[in-house]
Amino acid sequence: SLSRPQPQYPEALLFTGVPGQVLAEFVVDTLGHVELDTFGVISSTNPKFTEAVQRALPDWAYAPAMLQGRRVRQLVQQPFSFVVDSAVLKRASRQ
């Protein structure tokens, strides 16, 4: 199965509880891995959300794109949403 662990909500923003959005763009290679040096941000509500996405991407796997029966590199645009889970917020406020 394809692994795509969700980016962690940034600890520095936990107390604000603000939701966040990142629209990222990157190339997926012929093995289904993200080419990290192609990472770009189309939009982001906070640089800390962007960093969280960048940290998660090395562990992501995609099904490689196919063209005429051959695997090809493909430019992907991927949206990421961040919301604070109320349980996480309660734990953070108790520390």
Image (tube, grey):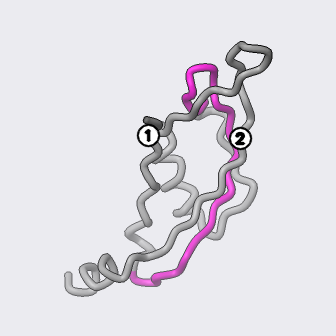
Could you tell me which residue is drawn at 73 percent across and 14 percent down?
Answer: 69
For marks 1 and 2, give the one nearer the viewer: 1
Relative to 78, is 32 above or below? above
**Which residues are drawn in magenta?**
15-35
Image side of residue 67 versus residue 7, left or right: right
Q: Give x and y (percent) for residue 51.
A: 52, 54
As for residue 83 lying within the magenta part, the answer is: no
Q: Which residue is mark 1?
A: 3
Q: Secondary structure at mark 2?
A: strand
Residue at 65% x, 41% y is: 39
Q: Is residue 15 above or below residue 44?
A: below
Give the vertical position of 32 relative to 4 (above or below). Answer: above
Q: Amino acid at mark 1?
A: Ser
- For label 1, the crowd category at 10 Å Cα-Cα, with few meaning under 14, some 14 to 19 and many 20 or more, is few
Q: Residue 30 lies in magenta, yes or no? A: yes
Taking the spot 70% from the left edge, 45% from the top edge, the residue there is 25
**Label of residue 76 in the image:** 2
Q: Quadrant of residue 12?
A: bottom left
Task: Identify the secondary structure beneath mark 1.
Answer: loop
Q: Quadrant of residue 81?
A: bottom right
The span from disc 1 to disc 2 (Cα, nearest Å) is 16 Å
| x and y, in percent, of residue 45 in the image | 65, 70
**Tag 1 and tag 2, C-beta contact below 8 Å:** no
Residue at x 53% of width, y 52% of height: 53
Q: On the rendered structure, is 63 left or right of 38? A: left
Crowding around mark 2 (Cα neighbors within 10 Å: few <14, some 14 to 19, many 20+) is few
